[in-house]
Image (cartoon, rainbow, N blue to C red):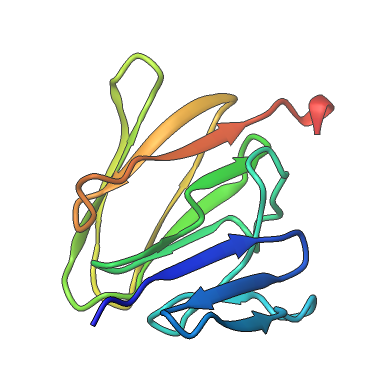
Amino acid sequence: MAFSVLALALVTSWIILTGNDREVVEVRPSATQPKTDPVGAACAMHQPGELLTPEEAEVRFDSSHLCLGYVTIVPSTPVRWHNEGKVASLVTVLAADGSTVFEETAEPGKEVTHSFDEGVYTYKVDVLPSFVGTVEVRPEEDA
């Protein structure tokens, strides 16, 4: 049986068209609730370039998902990588020149933390080898 799903993202809602029946289902996420990913962990919705507070500067991940692929902070704001998976994962942060700035293993259920100077960095977690995230550190006067 051929089954297809087409999801159209609108500003305030998702419309999902399913299968041959042309059933239309509209789901409106609550403005006060964070988005929920497939494994059930709440995922805050932030745009690239949106300045995050120390409480919001958290990357949560396991072997099938990662939440917050782009983190924007001011200098010295710690970024936390929280491993929600069942296996340890190496978190690696690279400077623009490719040199390693930070590298530490996050054990299951634990987190690792790093504070940054101004600049743009990339990060990887080894349980998601094809994913590359970004940490943008803006000068405080630009914030």
Q: Give residue 112's position: percent from left, percent from top.
A: 37, 58
The number of numbered discs placed on residues in the rendered structure image is 0
Residue at 53 percent across and 74 percent down: it is 17
Please identify the quadrant where the N terminus is shown. bottom left
Using residue 125 as the reference point, say whether residue 115 is left or right of it.
Answer: right
Using residue 16 as the reference point, say whether residue 55 is left or right of it.
Answer: right
Question: Residue 9 occupies which quadrant of the picture?
Answer: bottom right
Residue at 26 percent across and 75 percent down: it is 85
Depth order, front residue of 45/89: 45
Q: Give residue 68's position: percent from left, percent from top.
A: 51, 55
Question: Residue 62 occupies which quadrant of the picture?
Answer: bottom left
Question: Residue 93 occupies which quadrant of the picture?
Answer: top left
Please identify the quadrant where the C terminus is shown. top right
Rendered view: 14 above or below 28: above
Q: Give residue 4's position: percent from left, percent from top.
A: 37, 71
Using residue 63 as the reference point, say whether residue 135 is left or right of it.
Answer: right
Depth order, front residue of 35/95: 35
Q: Residue furthest top?
A: 97
Residue at 67 percent across and 81 percent down: it is 26
Q: Give residue 87's position: percent from left, percent from top.
A: 16, 72
Depth order, front residue of 8/84: 8
